[in-house]
Image (spheres, rainbow, N blue to C red):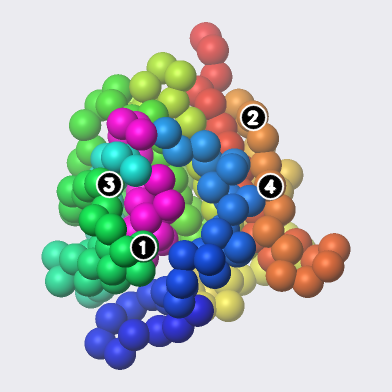
Amino acid sequence: MQMIKGYCGIYYRSMDDLYRQKQVELDFYQFQPGQRVASIGAQCCHWEAMYAAATDSIQFYLQDIDTSFFNPRQAGFAWHYYDSLRGKPMTGTYQMILGTEHGTGLPEQFFDKIMIINSFHEFTDQAGMLADLSRKLKKDGLLYIDEAVPRKSGQKHGVCKLPMLLPEEMIQLLQVNGYTLTGTINIEFRVNKTYRKIYAFRLSQP
């Protein structure tokens, strides 16, 4: 992987590298052509562009509240980078939506999947945002939360210095806010040492 001067995010050097390192995640997300996928806290837009390179015809809605990096120049670069890397035009599209700390600004009952990658612990109004997202998902839609796993309760994130949630804390928080866990995967950079966990949730049935 590499960083590109003048842009944020990290980028795979080849599609082979992408598939070798991300196939487990791609299998878990099960993207399908034609799906509408929102990414909350998209910032650099590089992960979404990478997923678009690996799966055709996804409609991405990229959302964030901070325009420091979240801007058309950055998103365009990320899409063009992976467009060039895969050697043929990407059929996945994207729209950019600026939200607030309390609402996404996204269309309602619209999304097959909503992703939150390394951003949930930064939410200042987690319950409010979960309520907002429940209105954006289709009835059978899925919410995915990708977060670093702390070693103990209250441990702070290494970059933003905000507290992270243990898996049991994450699951309980989502349950009390109307979601049911449907699956998880662990991302391990060292054998038997979980660095990240991706959770999949559905809306709880009334």
Residue 50 belongs to the span the image colors magenta: yes
Question: Helix, strand, or loop for circle 1?
Answer: helix
Question: Helix, strand, or loop for circle 3?
Answer: loop
- Give the residue type that dot 4 points to: Ile
Residue assigned mark 3: 92
Q: Nearer the viewer, mark 2 or mark 1?
A: 1
Choose the circle earlier in sequence order: 3 or 4. 3
Local packing at callout 1 (Cα closer than 10 Å; few below 14, some 14-19, many 20+) is some
Choose the circle earlier in sequence order: 3 or 1. 1
- Give the residue type that dot 2 points to: Thr
- Mark 2 touches mark 3? (CB < 8 Å): no
The residue located at (73%, 63%) in the rendering is 188
- Mark 2 touches mark 1? (CB < 8 Å): no
The residue located at (27%, 53%) in the rendering is 90
Mark 3 vs mark 4, CA separation in Å: 25 Å
Residue assigned mark 2: 182
Instruction: Look at the image and give the residue range highlighted in magenta.
Output: 33-55
Residue farthest to the front, as pictured: 87
Numbered tag placed on residue 185 in the rendering? 4
The residue located at (40%, 60%) in the rendering is 50
- Mark 3 touches mark 4? (CB < 8 Å): no
The one of 189 and 34 positioned closer to us in this rendering: 34
Residue 107 screen position, x and y as percent: 21, 31
